[in-house]
Image (tube, coloured by chain):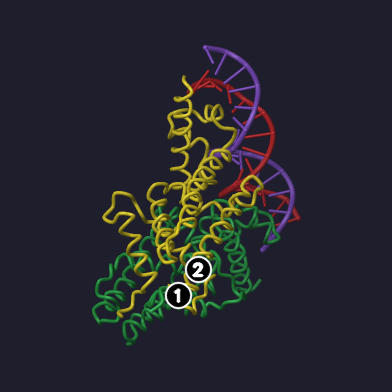
Chain colours: A yellow, B green, C purple, D red
Amino acid sequence: MTVENTQTRRAELLAIAAGLFAEKGFKNTTVRDIADASGILSGSLYHHFDSKESMVDEILSTFQEELFAAYDAVLAGDDDARTKIERAVRLSFEAIDRHRHEVAIFQNDADHLGKFERFGYLAERNRQSREVWMTLLTEGVESGALRPDLDVELTYRFIRDTVWVAVRWYRPGGKLTHRDIADQYLTILLDGIAHA
Amino acid sequence: MTVENTQTRRAELLAIAAGLFAEKGFKNTTVRDIADASGILSGSLYHHFDSKESMVDEILSTFQEELFAAYDAVLAGDDDARTKIERAVRLSFEAIDRHRHEVAIFQNDADHLGKFERFGYLAERNRQSREVWMTLLTEGVESGALRPDLDVELTYRFIRDTVWVAVRWYRPGGKLTHRDIADQYLTILLDGIAHA
DNA sequence: GTCTATAAACCGATAGAC
DNA sequence: GTCTATCGGTTTATAGAC
């Protein structure tokens, strides 16, 4: 088998594993589940990967690398504060659309996995995410785009939670695109649901 | 042992189990974990409960009964639409404060448990919750309290998600009380974060 | 009401044939 | 690259002594 096909097979297996991890949880997914879904036996998986842990490791680290590169691009841009916040929110919903398995795994299992040394980068990424949002929100308040009496820390948690938790019900190909949902969420977040 | 003490012991064991289920997840908590934390051996737990499943069943059903009685009281009241929405939100944060283990278990494990017949009432409670919020929001739009162009279905999901997901970081005795958090969340939800 | 002891099933992972 | 076969450990749950 060529190098290309080997890497393709590896990616295929990881995609199958990601779907199962997202659906059932990491601990609740057995290597036999992954092997069954892949049409091979459990022992054969160990030709491709060291362990079940190394599979979820590769899934999460690859995703996080791509996600944070996108956040960095927003931060480095020269848009005003409000536009940057909008871009960061839209980017997150796009990640849910394109990588919903990875987002779901991160949401459901990162806390537990993060306790092990091997997954220390997950906690580091959490800090990095907090820094991105706190920077954007503080800039927003200082520039007058956001209400001056805002509790920035609480607002950060509010945005983080509301955005990522949408992975629980969002399905690509549904009535609303990820762009529609981002629009609606931004309207509520910025202007509220009360009648003006 | 008296009936009172027997029931007290049962409640003690359930409280210990709830804490572990909330922290590590239902599947990831072993009966040995529960027994260890209770100061007895795993076999002894089966004198009190049929199975691990029946423990989480009792924990969740008891909590849901109390929670939905509270929602019903809000619906049955004669407050205006906006006040009812505020009361329902505050009530949810109070539930997170008083029953955070139960809320966490519901958030993390209800989807998976709900697939089994025994836990069919979880899906039924979800429908009931949706009905409560859809009623409140529709009433809010029709009375002019909420923006007329609101996507009610999406707003329902937004509120549901944002409220319950707070159980991930809220800890009683922290800097902010559950009342403080409800106030801030309602301000953001109703009026947004943008500068007027 | 708790303990001792253990059954029966399931889990992650390995060794070696093909 | 996959299969056969299996090891060692863990899990839920049970039976019976105390």
Q: Residue furthest bottom?
A: B78
Regarding mark 2 in the picture, which secondary structure is present there?
helix
**Viewer-proximal residue, A67 or A19?**
A67
Q: Residue at x 41, y 49 (%)?
A: A100
Q: Which mark is residue A144?
A: 1
Task: Check the image and report above or below for C8 versus B145.
Answer: above
Q: Chain of mark 1?
A: A
Say if labels 1 and 2 share a chain: yes
Q: How many marks do you count on the picture?
A: 2
Q: Which residue is mark 2?
A: A139
The residue lying at 56 percent from left, 42 percent from top is: A57
Residue A187, position as x, y percentages in the image:
34, 68
* Amino acid at the residue labelled 2: Glu
Spot occupied by residue B76 in the image (x, y as percentages of width and height): 33, 82
Q: Which mark is residue A72?
A: none
Q: Amino acid at mark 1?
A: Gly
Left or right of A54? Residue A166 is: left
Q: Residues within 10 Å of mark 2 (few under 14, many from 20)?
A: some
Instruction: Please tell me in which quadrant of the rendered image residue B15 appears.
Output: bottom right
Q: CA distance from mark 1 to mark 2?
A: 9 Å
Instruction: Please report whichever mark, 1 or 2, sits nearer to the chain's N-terminal start.
Output: 2
Which quadrant holds the C terminus of chain A? bottom left
Q: Quadrant of residue B127?
A: bottom left
**Chain letter belonging to callout 2:** A
The percent coordinates of residue B72 (x first, y second) are: 37, 78
Report x, y in % for residue B27: 54, 51
